[in-house]
Image (cartoon, rainbow, N blue to C red):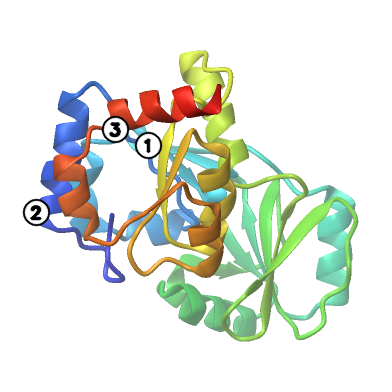
Amino acid sequence: MLDAGGATTAAVLAGTSRLRDLGLLPIVVTGRSRPAFLRLAGADPLLTLFHPEVLLEDGDVVLDRAGGHCRTAATLPLPAVDQVVRACADVVASCGGGRLVASSRRAAAAYAMAYRIPRRDIDVAAPAGPVSRLVVFDAAPPAVAGTRRRPLNAFDATVFTAAGRGKATGLAELLAERFGEQDLSRVVAFGDGDNDADLLAASRVGVAVQGCSTAARAAARVCLDRPLGTYLETVDLRDLLRCAARQAR
């Protein structure tokens, strides 16, 4: 939906508006942290078309854009947080309310560069409150029970989240809580990265956009060969859902 600079195109804006006119509800599910998301000022015209609650950190943090509140939907076990912080010198934790806390100035600087956010958005202090994510800038962090880990392709970093979590889980929880949905059987998901693969695979229809990763392409039912905006302006997603439902029977 957005480019690397946080901007969108007129076609994407028009296509998303069309989805709303068709009775569909767009929801943002992103890997961005709260500070990174809040800096997307240029996305405001697009975001007004989306559900006011945004799933951050791959669904582990929920931001209410209307009220400005942020809550943690999934937390790392406290023993796991303690183990990682004790074993590694350079760690950044995402704490309650989406606050970023670094164990060292070097970790804060590395995180700011890796995620392209200002260094001032990261405090240097001990983690406090619920921790949804740890980013470790260490070539060989320990294996930790109760966590899921994946490499961050920058600075030899590793991301720790709670085991069994991902975008699919976070979205399913929100849909159940807000709309009484039992699963993702009425969801069309769009994505381009490795962290989108679980959502693309679990949704009724997963759509991999142009320039997607190998994992996203393998998980998707549909792979776009045209710009996303052009697709959204012409496709009937309701019909796509109906066809996918018939094929699944």
Label 2 crowding class (10 Å Cα cut-off): few <14, some 14-19, many 20+?
A: few
Determine the residue positioned at 63% across, 52% down. 95
Q: Which mark is residue 191?
A: none
Determine the residue positioned at 54% across, 58% down. 218
Give the residue type that dot 2 points to. Answer: Ala
| Disc 2 and disc 1 in contact, CB within 8 angstroms | no
Of tags 2 and 3, the one toward the viewer is 3
Between disc 2 and disc 3, whose residue precedes? 2
Residue linked to disc 3: 237
Give me the C-alpha separation between circle 3 and circle 1: 15 Å
> Is there any visible trace of residue 37 in the rendered image?
yes
Question: Which of the 4 image quadrants contains residue 209?
Answer: bottom left
- The x, y position of residue 242, in whole percent, is 37, 23
Give me the C-alpha separation between circle 2 and circle 3: 20 Å
Q: Which mark is residue 27?
A: 1
Residue linked to disc 2: 10
Which quadrant: the C terminus?
top right
Give the residue type that dot 1 points to. Answer: Ile
| Disc 2 and disc 3 in contact, CB within 8 angstroms | no
Between disc 3 and disc 1, whose residue precedes? 1
Give me the C-alpha separation between circle 2 and circle 1: 19 Å
Label 3 crowding class (10 Å Cα cut-off): few <14, some 14-19, many 20+?
A: some
- The x, y position of residue 67, in whole percent, is 36, 31
